[in-house]
Image (spheres, rainbow, N blue to C red):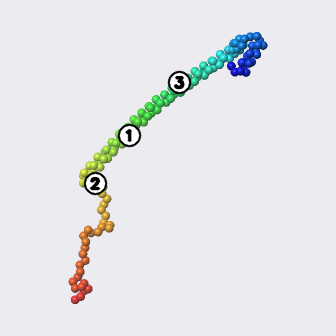
Amino acid sequence: LKPPIAAVLRELSALTGNSQSALVAELLEEAAPVFTRMVRILRAAEQAKRAVKDELVSGMEAAQTRLEGQLGLALTELDAFEGQLLGTAERVLRRRGRSAAVSGDAAAQRQPPISNRGVRSPKKTTVRKMKGGGHGSL
């Protein structure tokens, strides 16, 4: 006990003629109903805390199960779409391959058309001189 409380108990003991332990026992007996109620309240709070925790865990597990189910459906749909897309792409590539084989070299088909702008003859042309000076002399 703290010194001020111990001093009060000593003085009460001296004034009443009862021992300090008898005084403490009497005080505790009178407060027993309050202690009993406190114990019931604390037990109920602990049970409520466990129940809330259990409900929370149960709710989270149920939500996880639903999300996993939805994710499974989404992945199934994605797989189906992917299969359709790949099938279409393969058909287009096969068609392109056949048309390139029919019309000749596929690489040549993809070349841009040849342009004549700025094209010069690769041979050098020579200037011919006319006989006789080139001024029309007779």
Residue nearer the viewer, 40 or 113: 40
Tell me the residue that label 1 is attached to: 81
Q: Which percent across, then down, holds residue 113?
A: 30, 60
Q: Which percent across, then down, holds residue 75?
A: 41, 36
Residue type at mark 1 is Phe
Q: Is residue 54 above or below residue 13?
A: below
Please give the name of the residue rendered at 57% of the width and 24% of the height, measured from the top-left corner. Answer: 49
Left or right placement of residue 51 versus residue 110 in this view = right
Q: Are marks 3 and 2 in contact (CB under 8 Å)?
A: no
Tell me the residue that label 2 is attached to: 107
Q: Closer to the observer: label 3 or label 2? A: 3
Left or right placement of residue 47 versus residue 123 in this view = right
Please give the name of the residue rendered at 54% of the width and 25% of the height, measured from the top-left corner. Answer: 53
Q: Which percent across, then down, holds residue 107?
A: 28, 54
Residue nearer the viewer, 31 or 5: 5
Residue nearer the viewer, 114 or 33: 33
Which secondary structure lies at badge 1?
Answer: helix
Q: Is residue 112 above or below residue 6?
A: below
Please give the name of the residue rendered at 29% of the width and 46% of the height, measured from the top-left corner. Answer: 94
Q: Earlier in the sequence, mark 1 or mark 2?
A: 1
Q: Residue 74's quadrant in the figure?
A: top left
Q: Is residue 126 above or below residue 32?
A: below
Q: How many neighbours does mark 3 have within 10 angstroms: few (below 14), some (14-19), or many (20 or more)?
A: few
Residue type at mark 3 is Asp
Which secondary structure lies at badge 3?
Answer: helix
